[in-house]
Amino acid sequence: MNNIIISAIGVDRPGIVLELSSIIRNHGGNVEESRMTKLGSDFAIIMLVSVKKDWYESLKIALQAINELTITTKPTNENINKGVQYQIDLSGADNEGIVNVLSKYLAKKTLNILDMKTYISNAPVTGTPLFNLKAITEAKKNIDSSDMQTDLNQLSKKLGVEIVAFKLNK
């Protein structure tokens, strides 16, 4: 089996997931992992699909026949996590540059972002917009969690947010 990543973006409408998953199934493929969300008026999906080598080209062609979706396919290798994983939770006043500053810190510490979700919520009493971020990161070697939290505390003061990090695996 080959692993491929399929991404699709287009104006949101009912049936997009059905259409994609039917084509994948009809070409001997299986959705292994996926992320789907509506962003603005568009729907975006990214999937890791396993498919037999003989079906790969016909699957690509069939996917391109879907109207009003921009679809890309890319072969990929099976992911084998080898490092130590950390979760990072951030919440606070929404201001420009939060993702940029945090991702710069993570890159400097050679922490790879495996998964990240950001969203805006309203503070319970005041209704003030709050920026929220949840990330799963991976380091090839163990990082001292207290040193990381100290660094993140400095970043949180700079950004006016709260950041908490903790190790997920041993």
Image: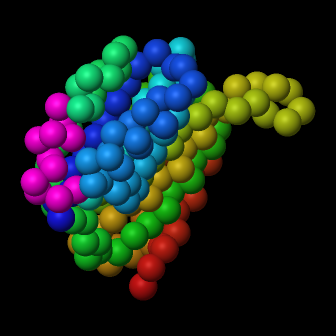
Image quarter (top left, top right, bottom left or bottom right) of the N terminus: bottom left
Q: Is residue 138 above or below residue 28?
A: below
Q: Nearer the viewer, residue 126 or 134?
A: 134
Q: Nearer the viewer, residue 25 or 160?
A: 25
Q: Where's residue 169, x and y in %?
A: 44, 79
Residue at 34% x, 40% y: name it. 23
Give the extent of the magenta segment: 51-61
Left or right for 155, reference 93: left
Left or right for 143, reference 128: left
Residue at 15% x, 40% y: name it. 58
Q: Is residue 22 visible?
A: yes
Q: Is residue 107 visible?
A: no
Among the 4 quarters of the image, the one containing residue 52: bottom left
Residue at 11% x, 41% y: name it. 57
Q: Is residue 63 above or below residue 141?
A: above
Q: Where's residue 155, x and y in %?
A: 47, 46
56 magenta-colored: yes
Q: Is residue 72 above or below residue 49?
A: above
